[in-house]
Amino acid sequence: MLKIAITGNIAAGKSSALKIFKENKGFTLNADKIGHKLLNEEVIKTRVINLFSDQILTQGKINRKKLAKIVFSDEKKLDKLEKLLHPKIFNEIKKEYKKNFNKKNFNFFVVEVPLLFECKKQDFFDIIITIIAKDIVAKKRANLQDYILRKKRQLSQKELEELSDYVVLNNQDKNSFKEKILKIIKNILRSHVK
């Protein structure tokens, strides 16, 4: 089964693209959601608390907003969290691929990975699709503070374009965006899926 990564800048429409792939026989995963799930595992939770103290807890659970506020204001802390979580996230992605790669009811294995290149995990995938939105459009879609903090961690649009097989500009309405993604799906099916 073909492995496809969907990446791109913050609030560009990566999750919307993932949903379109799911509607078209794609087995889909979201790396951020895997990370959120891992934060609830006792071993990971303990290590995160040891790194950032129990001030990140709300009613005994890791409060992701509190954690984000800490790590996105201090690059060293963010690096520590990423070094802890990213290898585990990609282990989960690989497990899911091994579990599902022979299933006939899926054409593709598609993963939304916001920091694909920054994590240096692009070689795992056969095709990379980057979703890009103009800053002004992305800022409207995202919480402004989150946008500013997360944008600093991402590659530039030019770098993303150079490293990708497909680049989708998402500055228009939802129907136009869906048409662009469907066109890519048809192209991939024609070129790669037997």
Image: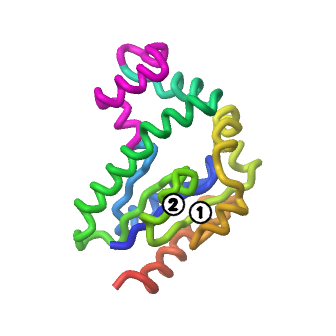
**Tag shown at residue 189:** none
Of residues 74 and 34, which is closer to you in this image?
A: 74
Q: Is residue 11 magenta?
A: no
Q: Which residue is mark 2?
A: 6
Q: Read off the magenta span.
A: 34-60
Task: Check disc 2: other Cα within 10 Å, few if <14, some if 14-19, many if 20+.
Answer: many
Residue at the extreme right of the image, as rendered: 136
Do the residues under discs 2 and 1 have CB atoms within 8 angstroms? Answer: yes
Q: Residue at x 52, y 56 (%)?
A: 120
Residue at 59% x, 25% y: name it. 69
> Residue flagged by tag 1: what amino acid is it?
Thr
Can you give x and y, in whole percent of width and height, for residue 2 in the image? Answer: 38, 72
What is the image's colouring?
rainbow
Q: Is residue 135 above or below residue 66?
A: below
124, 112: nearer the viewer: 124
The picture places residue 128, in percent across and down from the top left corner, at 52, 67
Left or right, 74 with reference to 48? right
Which quarter of the figure has residue 141? top right
**Secondary structure beneath disc 1?**
strand
Q: Quadrant of the N terminus?
A: bottom left
Q: Determine which residue is flagged by label 1.
A: 130
- Residue 37 position in % (x across, y down): 35, 37
Looking at the magenta stretch, what is its main secondary structure? helix
Secondary element at tag 2: strand
